[in-house]
Amino acid sequence: MFAAGWWMLLVGFLGQVPLGLSVAVGYRSPIWGWHRRRMAEALWGTQEIPPEAWPVAEQLLAMLGATMACWGLAMAAVVAVPLRRRELWAWWCVAASALLWFTVDTGLSAANGVRVNVAFNCAAALMMGLPLALVWPGLRR
């Protein structure tokens, strides 16, 4: 069970790097159209982000995407070495940072009515929570 959870965490965090970069530099691309439409509906009541909002949106998305990519890379490093060695602190590092992200991002998204982001976050939390639960019994305590 430990190995399966470990692999899921490693692949998930490594996958977050290109995902974050695509948010940072490719949010206008068709692959993000579904997200853009739902975001625009929630925040502006329109089908697309208004042209006057794009400079701010692109700046915020650049910061968000870069942060997602960097966090994914940093967590992959924690998973790859210390968590593989079954070091308890590494599990807490991943779990605490994921919980902080989930609480703040999901709470504010819900408060602002951005349900697409709430759903996206819940899926990501499950993809982290399950493997974290799988590796827990195998940790050195």
Image: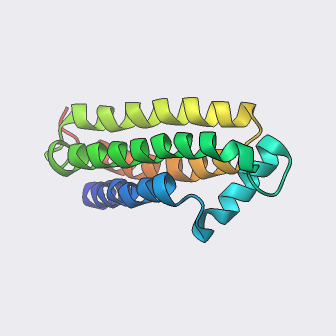
Q: Is residue 109 left or right of residue 101?
A: right
Residue depicted at x 67% and y 64% = 33
Quarter of the rendering containing residue 111: top right
Image position, residue 136 (x, y; %): 31, 42
The quarter of the rendered structure image containing the N terminus is bottom left
Residue depicted at x 65% and y 31% = 108
The quarter of the rendered structure image containing the C terminus is top left
Relative to 106, residue 32 above or below = below
Image position, residue 22 (x, y; %): 47, 59
Quarter of the rendering containing residue 95: top left
Image position, residue 102 (x, y; %): 53, 36
Count of marks overlaid on the render? 0
Q: How is the image coloured?
A: rainbow
- Between 131 and 23, the one lying in front of the other is 23
Residue depicted at x 27% and y 54% = 2
Image position, residue 66 (x, y; %): 40, 45
Residue depicted at x 62% and y 70% = 30
Direction bottom: furthest residue = 30
- Between 28 and 35, the one lying in front of the other is 28
- Between 67 and 95, the one lying in front of the other is 67
Q: Is residue 60 left or right of residue 91?
A: right
